């Protein structure tokens, strides 16, 4: 049976919206495929997004989504260990993978004459990854070493992305350490790994995206050749991770033996990201507060009060504003010297947010912020891999790859009133506040 196929072109708006082609088809085994032909340079990006991330991990198996990202490079049905790297790099390409809250992805960028190589490689490990005790033991050790390097032996290594969720959330899915505990990693069995692969790495739980110097007809032929015979498997029904609202401020302190100075992070739960009309005002609000010298908190804390060393703000535990499902927090992170009391920093943040909620945005503040956001977004889409990743996540989470073209217009539709209303929801009584103190501090 031939694949079903649909195509879409973006609507035109007054914003500087991109106009990338978005075409899609699906296979009988459930695999969804998005293609965006672009003959402007002889390069192709291939990305596979599996609908499994840190929130999908069962209790007692923290870090399993990330562990599996490593296992997927250890050989497959037809290839030995590291051969995936050999074929991609030998073709002049690059590759990687990453684990996020709501997905795990794998991707390659290659010369267009090697596009079929990438599709074969991704199909081969989707069909059957090499799950052996040797590979499991080896990659558990690799992940543990990565945690040592990136968290245990690095200043601010887990702050706030690992240390904030247990304060902000109540459920295991949202609050646990997605990097994983050493005890959980060491107790993982081959049966656990096989069950995880069968459950989450089914064709119907994945989105394959191909962007660059290809035609949709050629991609269909290659995908049929390499993916169509992978058996369909039952895909898990995704649970709701929604939690009850916070009604009293939650505070906690973490110690860091390597940090040279204190820091503080404030986090508020926002609205469901699936409703972009209600969610995007929070994304704009984070920019208004923290991005650029004219941003509210940058101006107040760095330029006027001059009592902090850095200010940042973003949506999502991992800073992935457009890449996460509900619940997703807005986080403000500030690093400050010892002589600046944390309560002074927090009071200034509260004052600036309250001023924005009471008085609204200044003239041209919204237009300037949205223009900067749109320019950055368009720069990120310019490389074929940046485009493939954004198409993939929009399709995986919203079944709307076309949002890649529509997002600038949606940002342009955000009103000053909506941003002001979003600011009014960021109150002291519904947030989590996490202090980081150097180990030597009292």
Image (cartoon, grey):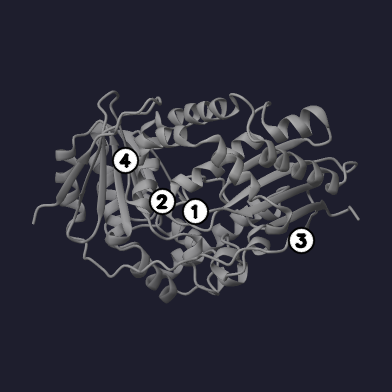
Circle nearer the N terminus (3, 2): 2
Residue 132 position, x and y percent, is 40, 68
Estimate the spatial distance between the alpha carbons at disc 2 and disc 1, rounded to whole Å.
Answer: 8 Å
Circle nearer the N terminus (2, 1): 1
What mark, if any, has residue 402 been given in the picture?
Answer: 4
What mark, if any, has residue 100 been given in the picture?
Answer: 1
Estimate the spatial distance between the alpha carbons at disc 1 and disc 4, rounded to whole Å.
Answer: 22 Å
Left/right of residue 407 with respect to residue 342 in the rendered view: left
Residue 381 position, x and y percent, is 41, 32
Helix, strand or loop at label 1? It is loop
Q: Nearer the viewer, residue 396 or 257?
A: 396
Residue 54 position, x and y percent, is 51, 61
The reply to whether the C-beta atoms of the residues labelled 1 and 3 are less than 8 Å apart is: no
Estimate the spatial distance between the alpha carbons at disc 4 and disc 2, rounded to whole Å.
Answer: 19 Å
Q: Is residue 93 in view from this perspective? A: no
What mark, if any, has residue 252 been given in the picture?
Answer: 3
Circle nearer the N terminus (1, 4): 1
Please identify, in this view, whether the residue under mark 1 or under mark 3 is nearer the observer.
3
Q: Is residue 167 above or below residue 58?
A: above
Please identify, in this view, whether the residue under mark 1 or under mark 4 is nearer the observer.
4
Estimate the spatial distance between the alpha carbons at disc 3 and disc 2, rounded to whole Å.
Answer: 33 Å
Left/right of residue 383 with respect to residue 230 in the rendered view: right
């Amino acid at each position: 049976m031939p694949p079903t196929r649909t195509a879409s072109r973006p609507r035109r708006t007054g914003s500087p919206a991109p106009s990338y082609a978005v075409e899609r088809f699906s296979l009988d085994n459930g695999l969804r495929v998005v293609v965006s032909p672009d003959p402007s340079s002889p390069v192709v990006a291939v990305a596979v997004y599996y609908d499994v991330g840190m929130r999908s991990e069962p209790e007692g198996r923290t870090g399993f989504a990330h562990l599996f990202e490593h296992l997927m490079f250890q050989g497959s049905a037809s290839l030995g260990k590291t051969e995936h790297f050999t074929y991609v790099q030998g073709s002049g390409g690059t590759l990687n993978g990453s684990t996020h809250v709501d997905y795990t992805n794998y991707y390659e960028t290659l010369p267009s004459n090697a596009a079929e190589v990438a599709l074969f490689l991704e199909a081969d490990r989707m069909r059957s990854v090499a799950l052996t005790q040797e590979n499991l033991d080896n990659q558990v050790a690799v992940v543990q070493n990565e945690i040592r390097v990136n968290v245990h032996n690095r200043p601010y290594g887990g702050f706030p992305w690992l240390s904030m969720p247990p304060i902000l959330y109540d459920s295991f899915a949202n609050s646990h350490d997605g990097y994983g505990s050493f005890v959980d990693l060491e107790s993982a069995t081959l049966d656990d790994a096989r069950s995880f692969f069968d459950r989450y790495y089914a064709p119907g739980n994945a989105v394959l995206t191909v962007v660059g110097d290809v035609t949709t007809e050629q991609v269909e032929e290659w995908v049929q050749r390499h993916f169509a015979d992978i058996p369909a498997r039952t895909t898990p029904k995704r649970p709701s991770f929604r939690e009850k609202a916070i009604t009293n401020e939650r505070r906690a302190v973490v110690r860091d033996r390597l940090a040279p100075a204190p820091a503080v992070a404030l986090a508020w739960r926002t609205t469901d990201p699936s409703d972009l009309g209600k969610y995007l005002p929070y994304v704009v609000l984070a920019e208004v507060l923290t991005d650029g010298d004219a941003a509210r908190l940058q101006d107040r804390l760095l330029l006027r009060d001059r009592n902090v060393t850095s200010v940042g703000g973003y949506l999502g535990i991992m800073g992935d504003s457009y890449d996460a499902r509900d619940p997703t927090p807005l986080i403000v992170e500030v690093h400050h010297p010892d002589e600046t009391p944390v309560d002074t920093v927090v009071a200034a943040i509260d004052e600036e947010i309250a001023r924005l909620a009471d008085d609204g945005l200044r003239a041209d503040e919204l237009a300037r912020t949205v223009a900067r956001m749109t320019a950055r977004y368009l720069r990120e889409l310019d490389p074929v891999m940046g485009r493939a990743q954004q198409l993939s996540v929009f399709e995986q989470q919203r079944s709307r790859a076309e949002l890649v073209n529509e997002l600038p217009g949606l940002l342009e539709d955000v009103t000053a009133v909506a941003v002001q209303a979003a600011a009014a929801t960021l109150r002291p009584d519904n947030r989590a506040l996490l202090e980081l103190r150097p180990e030597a501090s009292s």
